[in-house]
Image: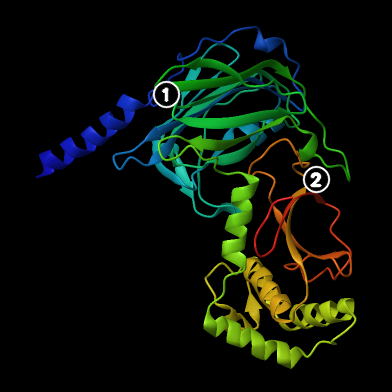
Amino acid sequence: MRILFIFLISFLSISLFAQSKFGKYSWSTFPINGKPDTVKCINGASIMLERRILEVVTNQEDQFEEVVVFHKKLKLDSHAAIDNYNKIYIPINNVIDIISIKARFFSPSGRITELKQESIRQIDNLDNKGDYKTFAVEGAEVGGQLEYFYILKRKFNPYSTVYIQDEVPRSNVMTMFVYPSKLEYIAKSYNGFPAFTMEQKDDEITYLKASIDYIPAISKELYSNYKANMMRYEYTLSYNHYNSSMRIYSWSKACKNLYDNTFDIDKKEKSAVESLLKKINPPASPAEARIRGIENWVKSQIAISEEITYSQTLNEVIKNKQCSKPNAIRLFVALFREAAVPFELAIAGNNEDQPFDPDFNGFNYLQTQLLYFPQADKYMVPDDPAYRLGPLPENVQGFVCTVHPPYQTK
């Protein structure tokens, strides 16, 4: 039985690697071009090489998974830089398997120190940001070079944002997408990062690639939208021709999902909302007074917290007087519908991180939900007790669409 079990594990691993192009990535998979040591260190550090590879594969159940490769090489010219960068943290949320973690340090004299695998340890829920693997390479010296890469098998994520610039200068930067040709992605670069080009496409596999020789450091400025000005790229899955020729992860799809998750309530929830509206007893008119009466009661009587993550019905929210941010939106939508107050549910972007791009049709920018009341011509932030009808947070920007029965896009 033990022999059979070992054989099964080996078979699954071989099956993954058989379809993965980069599951066996190594130090020498791509040659290093250029002269990265000519880049001047800032605050004692410079990145001599950075590679990101995201490969979409299918598992034994024909479900999509990702093989992710991240490879970085740094020059460390001060003790402070060694303290800051020699301890590596690898996020492992949504990671199915850690395929490989390798690291080494090149001393100024040429001595190479390899990472001992037993020195890799796990930290659970670091600073409430999830689980991490962490390690440090022993024997790090000023003037040396730290190089590491890791390969992860991760749950499939159809869209994301990747920032590729910070306070450290970079050289030899490359990012690559590899995926079955029956999938289609849209990828777009911002703030000077080069556009993606089609490196290869056949009936089986498609390769998208973007590379740049040098990325300057970008210093933090007080009160500036720092992340919004970094080089970054966005990507989203646009078509899955295994299943359909219809567009997916679009604004239209976002509106439908939002409508389904926000507007639908069952009979018990509707009854609880009807009773609550009678208790609130907002003014019948004018419209703005009716809106404010409902908003003030909910935001002063019900605790709205992003730390509440468990599932709740609206009748439980009303009874317990506490709820998550999504349920706060559901409650307001149900109350305003019951009160016959015309409104639209809007989805907005965040100009601190990702200024809204009207030419990128995907879920990437859909971060903030608002309610718009045409009779008052004002917006409400339904899930933030600090705001009342009218004023909006300064980071809210770029309204993508509005949703109301029947849902529609703008």
Q: 225 or 3, which lies in front?
A: 225
**Residue 173 seen in this snapshot:** no
Give above or below for 119 relative to 19: below
- Residue visible at 70% across and 76% down in the picture: 337
| The quadrant where residue 270 appears | bottom right
Looking at the picture, how far across and down is residue 78, in whole percent?
A: 71, 26
Q: Residues within 10 Å of mark 2 (few under 14, many from 20)?
A: some
- Amino acid type, residue under disc 1 in the picture: Phe
Q: 333 or 106, which lies in front?
A: 333
Q: Mark 2 — residue?
A: 351
Instruction: Give the farthest residue toward the top.
Output: 34
Q: 410 or 12, which lies in front?
A: 410
Number of numbered tags placed on the structure image: 2
Left or right, 202 with respect to 198, comes to: left
Looking at the picture, how far across and down is residue 268, in whole percent?
A: 53, 84
**Residue 276 seen in this snapshot:** yes
Looking at the picture, how far across and down is residue 303, in whole percent?
A: 69, 77
Q: Mark 1 — residue?
A: 22
Looking at the picture, how far across and down is residue 290, in whole percent?
A: 84, 81
- Residue visible at 76% across and 33% down in the picture: 230
- Residue visible at 78% across and 83% down in the picture: 297
Looking at the rendered structure, the secondary structure element under dot 1 is: loop
| The quadrant where residue 280 appears | bottom right
Q: Residues within 10 Å of mark 1 (few under 14, many from 20)?
A: some
